[in-house]
Image (cartoon, helix red, strand yellow):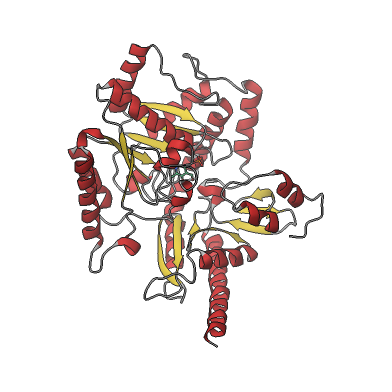
Amino acid sequence: MTASPNSAEARDIAYQLHSYTNARLHQEQGPLVIQKGDGVYVEDLQGKRYIEAMAGLWSVAVGFSEPRLAAAAAKQMERLPFYHTFTSKSHGPVIDLAEKLVSMAPVPMSKAYFTNSGSEANDTALKLIWYRANAMGQPQRKKVISRQRAYHGVTIASASLTGLPNNHRSFDLPLANIIHVGCPHFWREAKPGETEQDFSSRLAAELEQTILSEGPETIAAFIGEPVMGAGGVVVPPEGYWEKIQAVLAKYDILLVADEVICGFGRTGNMFGSQTYAIKPDIMVFSKQISSSYMPISALLINDRVFEPIADESSRIGVLGHGFTASGHPVAAAVSLENLKIIEERDLVGNARDVGAHLQKRLRDLSGHELTGEVRGVGLIAAIELVGDKESRQPWGTTGALGSLVNRHLQDLGVISRNMGDAIAFSPPLIITEREVDIVVDSLTEAMNRAAAEVRARRAVAAE
Ligand SMILES: Cc1ncc(COP(=O)(O)O)c(C=O)c1O
């Protein structure tokens, strides 16, 4: 890139190592520096505006300029900027938020536990599951089943739960005791002639086979996102969660619902667990809990989980776990105000209604020469691109077409994210139909531009 030596872009290249970035390519291309946001829009340093069709990282439910969240943060900063939750200490915002979350849960829950990121929350879930197994005199019950293409974060334990190669490669992960079963990606993984129900039955049978071959007494829990996000927006096929839960119940295996993306409205219900009739023992939240205005995450645990843990902490003398910022008062105050806004403005209803419009508009692109599959629910969706519709093969290497369309889309003023060749959409829950139209019209143009390039390159190759 040609940035002047003291520009923000040049200083970024000089001083920052970025997450989920090719560090060498970044040195050549530099960053997109965002300086402000309003509603569903963000603006870069040159003043160009983009619709943030990923809500940042699936997270800014109320949009980028909500004054009530800024006011809630300022008020709490002035009153009590920090206090903790160790050694029986507490404070108003964290108590209110714990009560609020337990009262919102779609199944009976007992206690909330606070952490600061989705990864920390899943890490904590795994530790609590192990602690509970020891508390129950079942030290052999330590294995946790996750799924290929799952995304549960990047700490050592969470990255192990994640089922994506790039989170394991060269990090010496996953840890032992984490097992990955098949991904419920109907379009990619179903066998010819299988219905969604057949496919779900096969996955449930494979899960049962895995449990039996590992030894049911060694399996502590199963973790899953109601809709997989970073693995490419994988919507469960019909009957999937019902059949999986039947197997888990048969062997008394805990179920963890990772609601980090789905929670607080994304799928058109308050929780993804409601959309798919999931009855978890542990629920994990982050992102839309505070619209990511402050870092915060939370777990809800039911009595099946809490009671043995309480006994074990009493036997040992302490629950030896906790983060300095667990239940941070400013993050808790912002979360409370954010949840109030989601309820008052019926953003869950908006996700359902405007989500239906997004899903329809994207499905109208099914006939496009580059479209493999369109999938999604509520305000989360993906369009998977292919080089060949019949064979469903990519154009060149996997991700080449996704990156190309994503780049065109960004030029056209829409920020999205390609996971391989799946272009994802997860806009703020406040998005309107008109704004959805701008996103999908821009996507259509980006796909047309990419298709023209593909055709041109094929013509050159054929000469
Ligand atoms: C479903 C899910 N779980 C966990 C995480 C990890 O959250 P964090 O990036 O806050 O550690 C993510 C992040 O995208 C996620 O999508």
The one of 391 and 346 positioned closer to us in this rendering: 391
**Quadrant position of residue 295:** top right
Q: Position of residue 376 (x, y in %)?
A: 40, 58
Residue in the image at 23% along x and 64% along y: 195
Residue 317 shows in this picture:
yes
Write down the quadrant of residue 316 in the picture. top left
Between 321 and 458, the one lying in front of the other is 458
Give the percent coordinates (x, y) of residue 174: 41, 42
In this rendering, does residue 230 appear at all? Answer: no
> Which residue is rendered at x = 69% and y = 54% of the image?
27
The residue lying furthest to the right in this view is 5
Query: Could you say where residue 6 lies in the image, as x and y percent from the top left?
Result: 82, 49
Where 36 falls versus 3 (above or below)?
above
Which image quadrant: the C terminus?
A: bottom right
Across and down, in percent, residue 59 comes to 52, 45
Q: Quadrant of the N terminus?
A: bottom right
